[in-house]
Amino acid sequence: MADLERTVLDFYQINTLNPVQWPTEKDNESDGSDDEAAAKKKTNRRKSRYQALERAVSARSSIVPGSENSGSGIGNLVQKDEPDPLGTTESVVRTLKQLGVPLQDDLRLRNRFLLSSTTFSPALFLSQMHATADTQSLISGLEILSRSIDQKSASLKVLVESNFERFVRAKATIDNVYKEMKYRGADPAPPRARTHSRHASRNSFRSGSGPPAIASPLSPATDPRKKNALIKESEYGVLGVKAPLLDVSAKAEEVWGPALGGREKEEHLKTVASSLDQYKEHVETSAAIADSIKRKDYETLVEEYTKARRFADEARQLAEEAKSVQPSDEQLNRILLAARMWHDIEEQIQVLKRDTWRQLISPYNAAKADTPEQPQDDQHMELISLLLELGVEDNPVWVWLLSRYDYLKSKIQSTAERSKVEIEILRRRLANADKPTPQTIASHMWALGRQSVETRSKNLDAADVVEVWETNVAFLNNLLSPQGILGEVLEFWQTVRGFIDGKTQRSLPVGYNSESKDHHRLSQQGTVDLQKAAVELVSMIRESVLMFFAGPPPEDISLLFSPMPPPSPGTPAVPSMSGSLTPRDPRFNLDPNNPPPPSPKKGETWERFAFWPPWSNCLSGVHYLPQMLALVGSGASDMASIAPVGKGDTGEVERVRTLVTVSRERCVLMLCSAWNRDAENFKYVEDWNRLPDSGDVTRMPTSFAAFEGALLSGMQKILYISDAMSKPGAGDIVLPPPTKLLKMVRSQYVTTLYKTLGGMVVNAERFPKKADDEWAVESDGYVLVNTPANPQLSVSTIGGGTVDASDRNVRMLLTLSNLQFLRSTVVPVLHTQFENAFSVKLTDESKTIRDVLTQIDARLFKAYTRPSIDALHRIIHAGVSSPTWSPAPSNTMRRAVRPYVYEALLALVLVHTQVSTTAASLTTEVLSYLLEQATRELLDAFKTRARYDLEALTQATLDVEFVAQTLSHYTTDRASELQSAIYQELDARTDNDARARLQAELPEMRAVLKRLREASKGEFACFRKPKRGAAAAAAAAGGPAGTGSRGGGGGDAGSDRER
């Protein structure tokens, strides 16, 4: 029975005795058989006389019993079955079938077990056929196989020996017949003698490439006897009759073809035309659908597919009715035509569905280049509508939302990780570079108020530092902006909410017979899962940003060493960062064998945070941090606007608030640290160039005002994140800054003022010289001096705004003028800006800063005037204590001022010249103070004498009055008091006679004083009171510095001098 089943299966070439459908491979075979039958019918008109010979050749496979045709139709000598070569069984196929090897389904596998096949595999045969055989049975099988081989070899040997003479005679006969037919009785040309040249032997196979050989006289072209010879040139004997046969055939076809085939063709065309007219829609539907798919005309596609489905349903109904009633031929034709049509259409639709699914779940890989203006969501809705119209088992809405969630999740993770590593690469390059010098830092602060807004951001810091800041902003912009990933998450939630609420489904089709209506509803569990997905996406963004601000820099940068993996099928590709970064930025082409070393641990504050560039100053920080926090604040507000986040778990809302709070706190902490460091280096900003519109001060006060103003303005944006408050609901997420941060900023602001003032004092007092050159002066920072080594760089050639900063007195005066400008203008403006920005009052701090400014001013003022006071002390005491100071009694009527008075006044002239040319606004203050000190020194000197006679009393009065009248423009209340004290001391040390005689001498003394002043008018012209117009011009040029006295009250000593 088993042999019979196998025979049946082999004959029909099927796999089972109970097939349920017609094998698809039989369709091709049937088509081929039809073609063969038609060809046979056409060629049966005239049978070849070699038909028997051809039939014998075609039936060659019948020689071997059990041979069969292969799947390609080519015969072979492989048997269907054979006994075991080892002698264990009579049927290899039946035995393997019992062992569970499916030989009937796979002919190639069966041939590997048959010894007669060329693909026989001994190893596979033994492992399957004799898997359980023992050694003894295998040895016995080997003996049987050896005997079988010997028997076959002996049989072949006997066959060859017995028929050898026949083989020889047959071979000779065949050669003679071939020679006779080929050469027509002529002898072939003798072969050319072959030389034994090694060169010729080596090139014997290349002789064909040489020039063509001379035509032989026996060639078919020249010898008519060779026309029918069996050679290639004569087409093996048929060349002579081929051309006439072709001509005759063409003529016969031309004459009798229309007559013989016209009626048959007519009947065939009528049958085809009637069938096409009757089933026109069935025939045209498949082509219409293919054309619609090609043109992407989905509306026409849906209409045609609906029509095809209706035809298929009608055919199914006829088939159901045919089970009980015998169908007619027309019904059978209709069922077959519908089945054929449906098969073709279903193949096209399945391919279209696969492509549509691929586009739906991979929107960024399959973006339509021909419709770039079409929104992405509209494209998805179009694809979903198409799938619903075509009818699918899976819910396309759910599949698309899940693919969108997976895409956003992978994009958030890859963008955050890659961006952080790229930022860390740039940070490491900065950290391993040399630390910028204080002069480099000061150059950026110096240039703050001297550049346009367009170029200011590029010059706030070094180019590498600015690059890190811009990379930080680009990272947060890609992650948190409405055009970035967070914007895509918001769009995702809007779409999800539309499907949950049922609003979006209203525009979706229900499909054929409402079969897709169930896909319009999301399950309750699906709704919960989508809400969790939205929360998870928000949480991933929030964690990435929080770790960027609060976490340490990443240690592992191997992500940049591995190439970006290609997106797997069905997984959306993640576009590059900033939507603009290339897949491999040239800046990050790193050598895996030589990665950037980690940042050195030097105890710097920026080593703990990933967002702060190494060695960055506070100006670049205060410029970029408000932009970064504005993105964080607006992004946090957008996160809270998602319903599952803002109205769901309260803990998630609190975590979003924590993101803003922690990010702001870290920014303020790092900015205050940089602010403090830059304040220490602000003294290097001083370049000792005068301010163009105020010649008494340098550029440092205005640079400091611009520096502090930029810091306070930026700090206000950082603390209150004002740029993000325009978002709806931002007030609930971006909370006011805590008191701790306000105190930190307040303390840092005051500290900055103290350190800047201290730096100004250092600039004024310290100016070290080089040890090897007593003429050259080493510049401290940006101090500009005259050096003999560089004569081109002199005061006169640098510009009118440059001063000789190597002179300590010049630096003192300019610093005093700067301090007065700070105290009167800059600091009050900064206090007001701070109070308005942070809504606090700096009452105590203002008083403290004023006191500090006063103390520093007094310290520098005394330091400047001390050399002049010492000189006055030496000159006056030496002159008064001189033995020749008092006139001799014999010369009592000599009236003249002593030389020490002229010497002291000339010293004051030098001071006046220096002050008026360096800081003119300080002239009155300095000269008034020195007048007070000179008067005090006169008082102290006069106290050293015990008695004053008339001559001494007259001389002292002349000296005091000459000084007082010469410096009358600079007289103060304190100087008048000291002058009165001098007269009281003189009066106490004289007698009544001298007093009485002095009163008589007063008119003459006035005349002498007038004459002496007229004589010295040219020498002391600088002390005269300027005219009203000149005074006003001087006051305008003097700038903001004050003119108050440091010595006390005003008034004059007229009555005392009269006495």
Image (cartoon, rainbow, N blue to C red):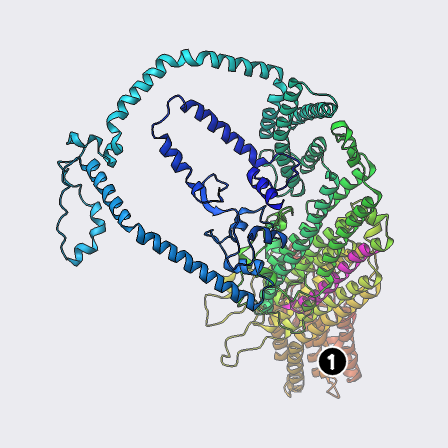
Image: 272 above or below 1002: above
Measured from the top left, where is residue 615 in percent x and y?
63, 66
> Which residue is found at the position 14% from the left and 47% from the top?
191
Residue 694, picture quadrant: bottom right
Tell whether 797 sits left or right of 654: left
Tell whether 444 sits left or right of 549: left
Query: Does the magenta stretch mainly form a helix, a strand or a loop?
Result: helix
> Which residue is found at the position 32% from the left and 16% from the top?
251
Q: Secondary structure at mark 1?
A: helix
Task: Tell me if residue 940 is in the magenta stretch.
Answer: no
Residue numbers of the magenta segment: 654-683
Structural crowding at the residue carrying mark 1, measured as other residues with C-alpha within 10 Å and reported as few (<14), some (14–19) or many (≥20): many
Q: Which residue is mark 1?
A: 939
In the rendered image, the quadrant that contains the N terminus is top right
Specify the amino acid type for callout 1.
Answer: Leu
Measured from the top left, where is residue 715 in percent x and y?
74, 57
Image: 286 above or below 195: above
Residue 494, picture quadrant: top right
Between residue 304 and residue 524, name the one nearer to us.
304
Q: Is residue 562 visible?
A: no
Measured from the top left, where is residue 928 in percent x and y?
71, 69
Task: Tell me if residue 674 is in the magenta stretch.
Answer: yes
Image: 695 above or below 774: above
